[in-house]
């Protein structure tokens, strides 16, 4: 197993989080947000961005996973649903990475059916070359190439989530 040197350094991540939080704060001035973190991957990005956003908010979490055998259909399982009623509220979904797009596209449909006032998506990383379904992303941290990455909340078999930076993961040389 090989982990590259930082692909995105701590300082780059912090700078970008600050910029995104600034945009979100301006866009939602005078409103109250319900920030929804998608676990586990988004936990670090979520914690960083919510404490930098300057508008009132409540927070909630979704725990999701995908069926390993159904990558082609992208079926996902809701392990733990929201505790908040989102009807009529301004929601920002906070995700770690968009790969095929299946997870966010499924969650978006599910949440829109609950009739929020608005629903925007903030994704830290966008692995655009891998996209299978289009999903509208309102705030993107970084576009990255088709590499498997770990750190800053993202894992390989549940490891490396604690790295404070993003690194490229290779199984062997
Ligand atoms: P999607 O449904 O294919 O867009 O996949 C989204 C989920 O797959 C993310 O929330 C991650 O948990 C996981 N994922 C996709 N690419 C990577 C990666 O490069 N490293 C770690 N996890 C990834």
Image (cartoon, rainbow, N blue to C red):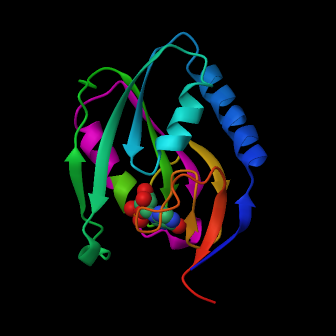
Q: Quadrant of residue 151?
A: bottom right
Quadrant including the C terminus: bottom right
18 vs 154: above or below: above
Residue 37 point in image, percent of width and height: 41, 38
Q: Is residue 99 visible?
A: no
Q: What is the span of residues highlighted in magenta in the rendered image?
A: 106-134
Residue 40 is inside the magenta segment: no
Residue appearing at x 78%, y 44% in the figure: 11
Depth order, front residue of 157/39: 157
Total number of numbered discs in the rendering:
0
Quadrant including the N terminus: bottom right
Q: In this image, 23 relative to 99: left or right?
A: right
Q: Quadrant of ligand 1?
A: bottom left
Residue 106 point in image, percent of width and height: 30, 53
Kindly give the residue lying farthest to the bottom in the view shown: 173
Residue appearing at x 70%, y 46% in the figure: 13
Q: Is residue 171 visible?
A: yes
Residue 9 point in image, percent of width and height: 75, 53
79 vs 15: above or below: below
Residue appearing at x 72%, y 34% in the figure: 19
43 vs 73: above or below: above
Residue appearing at x 64%, y 30% in the figure: 21
Residue 120 is inside the magenta segment: yes
Q: Quadrant of residue 116?
A: top left
Depth order, front residue of 157/55: 157
Q: In this image, 46 relative to 58: left or right?
A: right
């Amino acid at each position: 197993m090989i982990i590259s040197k930082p692909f995105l350094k701590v300082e780059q991540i912090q700078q970008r989080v600050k910029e995104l939080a600034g945009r979100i704060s301006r866009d939602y001035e005078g409103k109250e947000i319900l920030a929804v973190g998608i676990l586990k991957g988004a936990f670090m990005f979520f914690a960083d961005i919510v404490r930098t956003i300057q508008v009132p908010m409540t927070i909630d979490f979704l725990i999701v996973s995908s069926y390993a055998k159904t990558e082609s259909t992208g079926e996902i399982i809701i392990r733990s649903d929201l505790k908040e009623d989102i009807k009529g509220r301004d929601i920002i979904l906070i995700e770690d990475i968009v790969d095929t797009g299946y997870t966010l596209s499924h969650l978006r449909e599910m949440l829109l059916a609950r009739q929020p006032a608005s629903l925007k998506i903030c994704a830290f990383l966008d692995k655009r070359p891998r996209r299978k379904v289009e999903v509208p992303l309102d705030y993107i941290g970084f576009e990255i190439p088709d590499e498997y990455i770990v750190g800053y909340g993202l894992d390989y078999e549940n490891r490396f989530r604690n790295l404070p930076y993003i690194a490229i993961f290779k199984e062997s040389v």
